[in-house]
Structure formats: C-alpha cells, structure tokens
Amino acid sequence: MSNKIQAIRGMNDLLPADSTLWSSLDETISNLLISYGYKYCRTPIVESTETFSRAIGEVTDIVEKEMYTWEDNNGNSLTLRPEGTASVVRMMIEHNLPREGIQKVFYNGPMFRHERPQKGRYRQFHQVGAEVFGASDAKIDAELISITDSLWKSLGITARLEINSLGSKESRFAYRNILTAFFNENISQLDEDSLRRLKSNPLRILDSKNKDLELLISNAPKMIDHLDDESKEHFTILKTYLDNLDIPYEVNPKLVRGLDYYNQTVFEWISNDLGAQGTICGGGRYDGLVEKMGGSPTPAIGFAMGLERIALLIQDKKSQIVNKRCQLYFVVLGDKAQIESMKLSKKILQVLPNITLSNDLSMGSLKSQMKKADKSNADFALILGEEELSNNQLSIKPLKGQGVQQSIELEGIIQHLQEIL
Ligand code: ATP
Ligand code: MG
C-alpha cells in the first residue's frame, strides 16, 4: 500500500523543467514595470482577516467563500492573502507613503483562494499587480492599460480589452436604487446568491456567473447610462488616450469586477485561448479604499494579472521568451583532473557569470560523459583528461555543429571562451 505524501489539491509545484519559463516571465514583467517607474514591494502572505474583509467587501465571492482563515494561538483571526491590493493599501497607510507624493508600486507573489481547481483556476496561484496612489487623472488609467498592452505584445499573447465605468460614489448610489427596483420587479428569477446580494450589494448581481441569469442581467439598467458628468468626462478622456495609443477596446456595461472597492474605470484583458478561465488581467480605480482602510482620502488605481494563465498561453512559445544562457558541460577523467576542473570552473564562472557550466558528477567513461553532455543540451563540452592535463591543455568540443574540437592552453582558456561565446 502506498502512503506517499501529496501536495494539497489546487496547490502546485513549480517543476525544474518549467522554472526557466517562469523566471523569464517574472523578469519580463518586472523589467517593463521598472522601465515605467514602478517600484517593487513585498507584503506578508498572512494579514489580519479584517485587512481583506474590509477592503474587498463582506459580500463578495472571495470573502464569503474563498478565504483561508484561521485563528492563531492568541485568538487573532488571520487570513492567507487572496489578492494583493488590500495589503498594499494597508502598507501605504501604515508607512504614510502617499504623503511623500505619487506612489507607483508593483508586487509579485502567491495568492490563496479556496475555489474548485480546474485549468487556469488554482487554490494557490500567482499574481503580478501594479498600483498607483495619489493620481486621479485618467492618464494614469491609460498608462496601466498601455503597460499591459505592451506586455502581451512582447509575450506574443493575443487578448481583448474590455472597459467600463462604475462612476463616482454618488452616481453609483443613485444607480443602485434604480437597479434594486429592477431586480425587485423580477425577483422570482433571482437565485439564492442574488437574493442575498439584492439587499447587501445589488451591483454584484451583475457579476453573477449563473448562466440562467444572463438574459435578466443583460436587460438590467446599465451604470454606463447613469454616470454623472464628472464620471462621463473621466471615461471619455480614458477612451481618447486608448484611441491615440491604438489600443482597441470594447465597452462592456456588465463588467463590474468581483471586488467591492472599485469606482470609475474598471477593465479586464481576456484571452480566447483559455476556455472559461479567459481573464488574464483585471484592474480598476479604487479612489475610496485608502480612506475606508483608515488612511487619508487618496485616489488610487491598479491591476492584477494571473501568472498561471499567462504561462499557459506562452508555454508553446517557450523559446521566444526564454533568454538563453550558453551552456557548457565539463567532461573530466582521472582524480587529478577532477580537482583541476573544479578550480578551473570557479575561475571561468567568476569571469563569465552568465553561462551555465555543469560539472560532470557521474564519474563515468569518456563515452558516457559525452553522452550526458549531449543529453544536457550543452553548446560545448570542455574535456579534461590525464593527457590534456599533462600537456597543460583542455579540449573544447562544439556539440551543435559549430566547428571542430580544439585543444587550448589552460592559461588561455578564459580568453578563448570570451571570444567564442
Ligand atoms: P475570475 O473571474 O476568473 O474568478 P477574479 O475576478 O476572481 O477572476 P481577480 O481577483 O480580478 O480575479 O484577479 C486577477 C487575476 O488573477 C484574474 O484575472 C486571473 O488571471 C487571476 N486569478 C484569479 N483567481 C485565480 C485562481 N483561482 N487561479 C488562477 N488565477 C486566478
Ligand atoms: Mg474569482
């Protein structure tokens, strides 16, 4: 009987074979955000439960059903973060950062939601998110969308952009009454979740994933038709930026996003190549959240993208994004040569840190080591045997048809490698 220990369902290992893809994905996204002036930040994976329930809203899928929450030994309620924005807002307030001027930050890390695992939906997944505090102009909304657009282009991903406006707090309040009246007129068609939300937050009914409600929702009054003048103008300016940046978009009046804190601009990028889990990035403005979390009123906006879904999209294009290091395999024969090869490897890697030099550890015959060199997909084999050593030489054998094997003086090896790599 097997008593193997297994990982928790929906929480996946990153296997060594996929790590190059993931690290180059991380690097591509970080470099892009840094080039736009965003600074990396890191918050703890665990926060007090209130950080999320207050920010995300009690009546949301996340807070109602998806959080990993427990009580610690002191009786405090703690939660594994289900998303990044709430923690970043907590950090901003705790360290008074918005007082120092506009803050542009990004994060990258694991998030936890107790959902039904399926392709593109996991219980531990990874997000990169960017957030801007202290800027209210639609220019920054456009910058965030433009950054994501550039990212899809550089990764070779095709995604479509949907945008909507949720208006200001005041206009949303007026709309909420209109929407409540509409759903009350059609109350017999609502499911259990929606009935509850009708009382607590009717806008969230628009975000329902229940197919039976689709028709009713599409006939419901739309926020976009009830915006006040200021919200209309903000949305128009955003669209003007997008037009000028040649970023196509579709206005989707049903887009409300699954968290309570949004106002004005909301957007999602959706890929058609992922089935039901097509949203690869979602974001929006949350001007009221800093105040709601106990800070001074501060306009803010951000997005988060799901890295697993993006990785699924670029898997087939691995070679395009993987930034390839030159690989060498050190074939070594004889005890004296073993010691010499370790000394030499150290010297070589000090001067050429961007190559990968694998030292043979099998201690097999020349033939078997050469086979391993080939199998490792190395570009060159360095060969050091008793004979080479007694001549103070090393052989370099190209493994991918780049010429013939050569013998090089040990002293000149680094210079030679610098020339050919
Ligand atoms: P969905 O509608 O797919 O549940 P969401 O609205 O809950 O998404 P957000 O909270 O906006 O998602 O998170 C931003 C992004 O993070 C999503 O667009 C998606 O790419 C990714 N994401 C969210 N939940 C998961 C999950 N359980 N597994 C993998 N990726 C996820
Ligand atoms: Mg969700």
Image (spheres, rainbow, N blue to C red):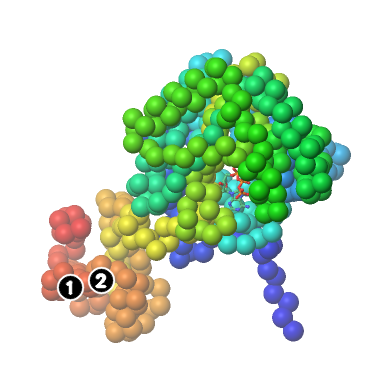
Instruction: Give me the residue at 25% from left, 71% from top.
Output: 381
Mark number displayed over residue 401:
1
Q: Which residue is mark 2?
A: 381
Q: Residue 193 vs residue 401: left or right?
A: right
> Residue 9: x and y, percent?
68, 63
Instruction: Give me the residue at 34% from left, 47% from top.
Output: 154
Residue 357: which quarter of the image? bottom left
> Residue 82: x and y, percent?
66, 44
Residue 257: which quarter of the image? top right
Q: In this view of the protein, can residue 91 be seen by the observer?
A: no
Q: Residue 16 vs residue 349: left or right?
A: right
**On-image quarter of the C terminus:** bottom left
> Residue 301: x and y, percent?
54, 28
Secondary structure type for disc 1: loop
**On-image quarter of the N terminus:** bottom right
Label 1 – label 2 distance at C-alpha: 12 Å
Badge 1 vs badge 2, beta-carbon distance below 8 Å: no
Q: Residue 362 vs residue 74: left or right?
A: left
State which tag comes first along the sequence, 1 or 2. 2
Residue type for callout 1: Gly
Compare residues 413 and 290 and report the one nearer the observer.
Answer: 290
Residue neighbourhood size for the residue with mark 1, other residues' Cα within 10 Å, grouped as few (<14), some (14–19), many (≥20): few
> Residue 379: x and y, percent?
25, 67
Residue type for callout 2: Ala
